[in-house]
Amino acid sequence: MKWLRISSALTGIAACSFVLVQVAPHAREAGAILAARDDPAALSELKLDAALAHNDRLVQDNIEAALAAGDGDLADSFVTLAHDRNIALPDDLLSRVSDAVKTENSTSHFARRFATGLVTGNADDVASLSGTVAGDLFVIGDIRDVVREGKHLAMGEDTDRLVLGLATAGLAVTAVTYVSAGGAAPVRAGLTLVKDARKVGRLGEGLAAWAGRSAREVVDTPMLQNAVASGSVLRPGETVSAIKAAFRVEKAGALVRLGKDVTRVAEKTGTRGAMDTLRIAEGPKDVARAARLAEAQGGKTRAIMKLLGRGALLLIGGAFDLTLWLLGAALTLFGLLSSIKATTERLTQAWCDRRRRRRLRRARLAADAALANTAVTA
């Protein structure tokens, strides 16, 4: 029975050790991810490790897809990621990416996209954003948007209140930009990007809902309707003054922070990177996280967000499973330590019992010898 108890304890050690070897890597990864949940840069690195470990052609396939879609900037972001990860790429593929980037940065392409952004107010790259921001800085773009959406509102038609609010905020920020000699320009550019993302349907639903609520708070609707009724793009000075009066500066703090964060992303990843962020973001906190990610990862950011989506910014839906891995590892470790303790105790007890039996046997032998001597003497 004693050796059966020792054998069961040894079996427990073997079983727990085997399970722990299987669980430990997952638990270690889970612990690292949970520890990095508030650090987008560290979190994205851990998730990239897992994604690239399962598909060694992941980067190359995405470069091919980006080139096929005419997005040389995204392809170049994947090349940057490949270099950072020491992933070898074919020379002909690198040459194609280089040619695509040169084409996108050519003077003719820039001029054409600048004009498109200036006239239409829509931006999807650096050149068109430059045109859009130029139009907004000269108040033409914002007046156009406010007058158009404001008249829809006054006539009871469908109105994009988000574009209306952002354009109104943009006019007020533009005035500050001039007064501060460009100090508010980053906010101006960020708000323009959010507005353009909304126009082209690339603003995430969650972020759009939040921005819509914030935009409604910063606009005095009755006053704006009166301003729009008499406003015109042909009378920019008069129209801007009337619209600015409808802007509630004290309510604009959240939108201003959003504009700054969007600009921080665009400075590191380009306009398309900022648009990618606005598409996957569910709220201003996601944009702030994306800004931190962009500042840490630079040119790799677009590739990271393409591979991981919103998961590059925060821990999504896996916290429970990760916690289970940690709990399983902890329970297995507890079982191993308990088995070691039980084995040690039982082996020690067996050793003590053996010494006690040997001592008793020697005592009996000594007593028997003493009795024999006594009998001989008698």
Image (spheres, rainbow, N blue to C red):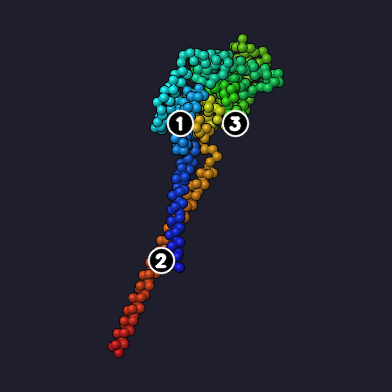
At x 59%, y 20%, the residue is: 167
Is 214 or 38 nearer to us in this picture? 38
Q: Is residue 225 above or below residue 84?
A: above
Q: Does the image show residue 333? A: no
Mark 2 secondary-structure assignment:
helix
Quadrant of the image for the N terminus? bottom left
Q: Is residue 81 above or below residue 230?
A: below
Question: Please, what is the three-letter code of the amino acid marked with disc 2?
Answer: Gln
Image marks 2 and 1: residues in contact by CB distance under 8 Å: no
Pair 1/3: label in front: 1
Mark 1 secondary-structure assignment:
helix
Pick out the residue farthest to the top: 234
Question: Please, what is the three-letter code of the amino acid marked with disc 3?
Answer: Gly
Mark 3 secondary-structure assignment:
helix
Q: Is residue 314 above or below residue 189?
A: below
At x 31%, y 86%, the residue is: 374
Residue 211 has which mark?
none
From the viewer's perspective, tell me whether residue 168 is left or right of residue 96: right
At x 44%, y 23%, the residue is: 97
The residue at which mark 3 appears reads as 206
Nearest to N terminus: mark 2 or mark 1: 1
> Mark 2 and mark 1: span between their CA atoms?
61 Å
Residue 59 has which mark?
1
> Mark 1 and mark 3: span between their CA atoms?
29 Å
Image marks 1 and 3: residues in contact by CB distance under 8 Å: no
Nearest to N terminus: mark 1 or mark 3: 1
Question: Please, what is the three-letter code of the amino acid marked with disc 1?
Answer: Val
